[in-house]
Image: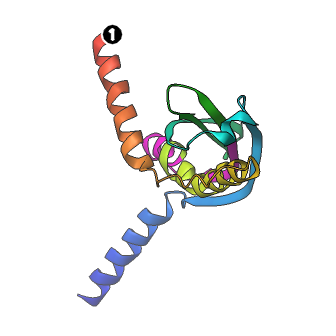
């Protein structure tokens, strides 16, 4: 019986070792692009402040070499005051270089589409807030984003479109 358990454990260990271990490391986080525009300054500082915030968010990724990917999170905050008068536009493209190995295609898509943007978002949020403060406006504290839910919605749309074309 003991020999049988040892053989089963050895067989399980061999099966686990036949798969490449998952490797994930963050190599660099950087700002790829940064922009701030306040087209109505200085007149905007003399009007009553009742902001409306529109946030656009996008991600993209490219493979730089085998197992190394760049992920870019783009945030654009357009703030209007009152009647569609643009007060300011703050934009950032926050990027990261990630070394990722040992994932199947579905797990890789999820990692690049949700996990990596989740890592980049706090940096992008800070960059936007810093730009807004430098523009002499009140802080713009962006709410957390559920990248897993956004990824799931995008995958569902992709599946529906693929089914529609088939």
User: Which residue is nearer to you in this view: 6 or 68?
Assistant: 68
Q: What residue is shown at x 56% (from left), y 42% (from top)? A: 48
Q: What residue is shown at x 43% (from left), y 41% (from top)? A: 106
Disc 1 crowd, CA 10 A, few/some/many (<14, 14-19, 20+): few
Say if the magenta span includes residue 19. Answer: no
Q: Position of residue 104 (x, y in %)?
A: 47, 45
Q: Position of residue 152 (x, y in %)?
A: 35, 40
Quadrant in the rendering for residue 13: bottom left
> Is residue 37 in view?
no
Say if the magenta span includes residue 103. Answer: yes
**What stretch of residues is rendered in magenta?**
91-111
Q: Is residue 157 left or right of residue 143?
A: left
| SS at circle 1 | helix
In the depicted structure, whether residue 108 falls above or below residue 162: below
Question: Label 1: which residue?
Answer: 165
> Is residue 9 in view?
yes
In the depicted structure, whether residue 33 falls above or below residue 22: above
Q: Residue furthest bottom?
A: 2
Q: Position of residue 32 (x, y in %)?
A: 76, 41
């Amino acid at each position: 019986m003991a020999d049988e358990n040892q053989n089963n454990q050895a067989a399980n260990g061999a099966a686990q070792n036949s798969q490449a271990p998952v490797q994930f490391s963050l190599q660099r986080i950087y700002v790829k692009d940064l922009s701030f525009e306040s087209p109505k300054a200085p007149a905007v500082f003399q009007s009553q402040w009742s902001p409306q915030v529109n946030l656009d968010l996008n991600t993209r990724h490219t493979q730089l070499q085998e197992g190394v990917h760049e992920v870019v999170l783009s945030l654009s905050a357009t703030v209007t005051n009152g009647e569609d008068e643009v007060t300011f536009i703050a934009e950032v493209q926050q990027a990261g270089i990630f070394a990722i190995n040992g994932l199947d295609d579905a797990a890789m898509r999820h990692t690049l589409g949700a996990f990596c943007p989740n890592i980049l978002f706090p940096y992008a949020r800070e960059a936007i807030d810093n730009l807004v403060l430098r523009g002499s406006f009140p802080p713009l504290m962006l709410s957390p984003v559920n990248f897993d839910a956004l990824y799931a919605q995008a995958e569902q749309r992709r599946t529906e479109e693929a089914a529609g074309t088939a």
